[in-house]
């Protein structure tokens, strides 16, 4: 049966590119900010480009943090892409201004400490062994990145009842940052799978297969 995906329209992100990529792997995609549609879909994809603060303003305008939270409370899959991943953390610090994020994961988005920014182009990812997200994807395969900010330290603290998230890393200019997180129904990538060709399509297919 075809899986339905709501692609959250909150004024940020290349929605057409993400829509085409998800449709390519067999999803029935609706670009929407309608709460009922967002909550009813098999999966919710949250893209994002630009500044953390402006993305959060747009997200709050369509009640995005609440909708994401409600889906996750019911173990309903969510996929964050690029800044759509960053906003899932506690906060973003840009030009000395801190903006509160969705708070699904602890951590702060900060400027990469690299000699050349933005980090733009193809890069490998230090995958976690046994990852469902990267199933069938070789360790040397490359994904497409465009960003100057990232999560440079992982601060998640689990307990005996919590399954630790699977965190994959990448490196640019000597600075390491979180490239992807797989945390039960919540997946996120700093890179753009929708711009990463056949390998990105395989990752999106892996996500669709979990819906």
Image (cartoon, rainbow, N blue to C red):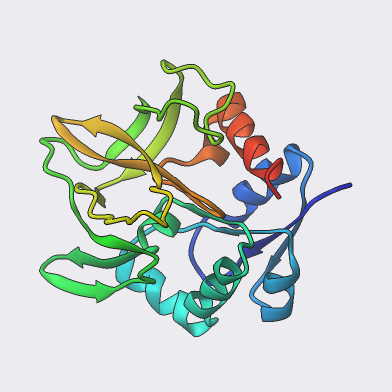
Residue at the far front: name it.
160
Give how far across and how far down residue 209 sits, in percent.
Answer: 71, 40
Residue 142, position in %: x, y? 43, 23
Name the residue at the right extreme.
1
Q: Residue 45 versus residue 116: which sits nearer the camera?
A: 45
**What is the total number of numbered labels drawn onto the structure image?**
0
> Which residue is depicted at the point 77% across and 47% down?
27
Left or right relative to 180: residue 21: right
Residue 158: % across, % down: 32, 55
Q: Is residue 4 above or below residue 122?
A: below
Identify the residue at horizontal 64%, vertical 62% (top origin).
76
Vertical comparison of 177 with 73: above or below: above
In the image, is residue 152 above or below residue 201?
A: below
What residue is shown at x 69% (from left), y 44% (from top)?
A: 208
Height in image: 191 above or below 49?
above
Question: At which x and y percent is residue 92?
Answer: 25, 65
The residue at the point 13 percent across, 38 percent down is: 114
Q: Nearer the viewer, residue 70 or 37?
A: 70
* Left or right of residue 177: residue 132: right
Location of residue 198 (image quadrant): top right
106 with respect to 130 (left or right) = left
Q: Which of 4 and 106 is in front in this view?
A: 106
């Amino acid at each position: 049966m075809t899986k339905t995906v709501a692609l959250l329209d909150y004024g940020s992100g290349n929605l057409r590119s993400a829509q085409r990529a998800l449709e390519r792997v067999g999803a029935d995609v609706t670009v929407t900010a309608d709460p009922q549609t967002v909550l009813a879909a098999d999966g919710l994809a949250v893209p994002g480009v630009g500044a953390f603060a402006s993305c959060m303003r747009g997200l709050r305008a369509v009640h995005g943090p609440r909708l994401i939270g409600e889906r996750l409370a019911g173990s309903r899959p969510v996929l964050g892409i690029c800044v759509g991943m960053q906003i899932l953390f506690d906060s973003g610090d840009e030009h000395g201004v801190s903006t509160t994020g969705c708070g699904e994961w602890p951590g702060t988005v900060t400027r990469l400490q690299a000699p050349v920014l933005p980090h733009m182009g193809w890069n490998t990812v230090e995958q976690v062994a046994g990852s469902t997200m990267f199933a069938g994807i070789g360790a040397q395969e490359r994904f497409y990145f465009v960003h100057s900010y990232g999560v440079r330290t992982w601060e998640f603290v689990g307990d005996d009842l919590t399954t630790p998230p699977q965190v994959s890393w990448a490196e640019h200019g000597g600075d390491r940052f979180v490239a992807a997180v797989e945390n039960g129904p919540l997946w996120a990538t700093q890179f753009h799978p929708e711009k990463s060709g056949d390998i990105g399509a395989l990752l999106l297919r892996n996500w669709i297969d979990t819906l």
